[in-house]
Image: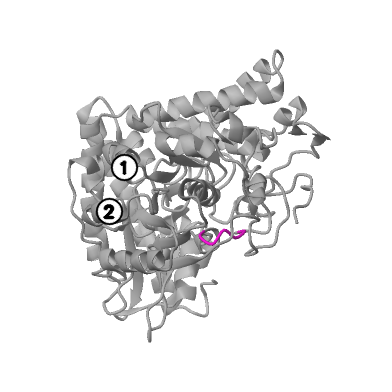
Amino acid sequence: MRREPPGMSAGASRLSTPERTPDDGSRYRLRDLFTPLDTLLVSGGDQRLALDARDRVNGYGCAASPEPELWNFASSTASTISQLAYDRAALAREELMHKCLFDEVEVAFDARCEDMREELRGHLQLPSRVDIVFSPSGTDSQLHALFLARAVLGAAPVTIVVGADQTGSGTVHTARGHHFSSLTASGFTVRKNSPVAGLAGDSIAVPLLDDASDLAMRRDPDAAAMCAIQDSLAQGRRVLLHIMDSSKLGWRAPSEACLDEIAKRWNGQVQIVVDACQMRLGRRRLRGYLDRGYMVLMTGSKFFGGPAFCGALLVPKGLSRAVDGLGEIAPGVLDYAGRCDWPMAWTALRSRFERRPNFGQWLRWEAALAEIGSYYTVSGAFRTRVLAELAAGIDSMIALSPSLRRVSSATRTTGPDDEEFAHATIFPFTLQRDGKPVSIAETTAVYRALARDMNEEIGGSAADRQVATQRCLIGQPVRLERPDEAPQAVLRLCVGGRLVTEAWSADAAQAQRNLQHILDRIAHVVAKIELLLDRATAAPGKFVLEA
């Protein structure tokens, strides 16, 4: 049962209790836009956006305003907002306030969202026939994809998730059409893991980790996906196939050959959605997925470095026509979108939803668009060079470290469609002591200590103190489990688009110095990890890592 949303709280979406009218739902007042920008930027999402009362950071260690002194190599998880992005959000709010003096808030907001769709299509070089559904997070977009797949397939599909062990934690719920949190971004209180009205179904998990090898990708992801599809269709069920490009460890599956075989054998019975939330794929590959008729999940907050929680679903035109002609819709999806989230061309579908502008979601996307635009103003050749040199440098640092062990990269065929992403941008590793992996608790403690000034706890020489002082973010631990073995946690050093733009200079010599400066910072992060592990071992009575 849906309940009326509460007032504003940390991580909630409402800035004030909205006015209700019987004909057009929630109407936001202009005064909501005068809320402090930092508060707006963490509104309009679920509880993952909530800021810690003491440190004023969310669960990923990111504040609502820029922290240039914090080094960020955590783009697989979340990034702190840059000054460029923060300034764009501030300006966008001022411009909307001005427009609201002449139009209703909902009208001006709707027009701005449509402009952002056009801007995003331009940056990604997508044709106008591709529609964009905005959302507060990639997890919300998964529910939107399930909703649209039901419309296209004409029945409740079973969701097959390839890479279920390396996708967002909420996917285990959204794949079955269940609530993934106790609070929706619209501010409605729900029961986590209970069915979303009209969306509930079944799901099948296809993990990518090889049970028999040492933290490597399974050898048969294509066969596993094909088998799951065949079994589901044999039971008379349609399939929503959730494929991975790329996973938390940078893996992609199934192969293009497998996808071609699926289309050949089961056209019209299987709808594919690509989990590209990491956005570590070339624009040509992205267009290729859409040209095949696949939906694509994306965010502006992973590779591109926008603030956490700005998601979108890219929808090819053929699906758009089917969706807008829907008769009945799943009532539960009304809690997960407002009218402005859907493209203006979808007039019939939009009419079912409340006028419920999500100012936080919008401002986070404004910030993300600043990063995306900045990234693509850099030439393709320079982007490729930077990613290649950073990949070589990070691989070398991990290989030379006595305490870091690189997790095997998945073998995949690369081609021109991969563009700069022929090079890895996620570098997963485990922590080792005496040749054995440290515990998940200690790995988590290291991850958290990296984000803190550890000068007082570490002590030692002036050089050690300098290393310990620097705060830095890396990709949060990924828990990996295999039968008959203790679970392990994998950390990640990540290259994001913002590093490319920071390295760019028209002066080649300066660009090389900028690139070296980034590599020096990464070396500093590795040194701090080594120092934390060494101090925890050498002086347990003086310095204890707390998980």
Q: How many other residues sit within 10 Å of disc 1, few (<14), some (14-19) or many (≥20)? A: few
Rendered view: 171 above or below 340 = below
Pinpoint residue 382: horizontal percent, then vertical percent.
Answer: 23, 34
Tell me, yes or no, whether the highlighted magenta stretch contains residue 176: yes
Give the residue displayed 60% in from the left and 54% down from the top.
Answer: 48
Rendered view: 301 above or below 494 = above
Q: How many other residues sit within 10 Å of disc 2, few (<14), some (14-19) or many (≥20)? A: some
Q: Name the residue under label 2.
A: 259
Give the residue displayed 44% in from the left and 26% down from the top.
Answer: 119
Marks 1,2: beta carbons within 8 A: yes
Q: Is mark 1 on a helix, strand or loop?
A: loop
1 or 2: tag closer to the N-terminus: 2
Q: Give the range drawn in magenta.
A: 175-179
Q: Can residue 80 be seen in this view?
A: yes
Q: What element carries label 2?
A: helix
Tell me, yes or no, whether the highlighted magenta stretch contains residue 373: no
Three-letter amino acid code of the residue under disc 1: Arg
Locate residue 530 relative to residue 539 in the image: left or right.
Answer: left
Locate residue 439 relative to residue 147 in the image: left or right.
Answer: left
Q: Mark 1 points at which residue?
A: 292
Cα–Cα span, label 1 and label 2? 10 Å
The one of 450 and 377 positioned closer to us in this rendering: 377
Pinpoint residue 72: horizontal percent, then vertical percent.
Answer: 43, 48
Q: Can residue 51 be seen in this view?
A: no
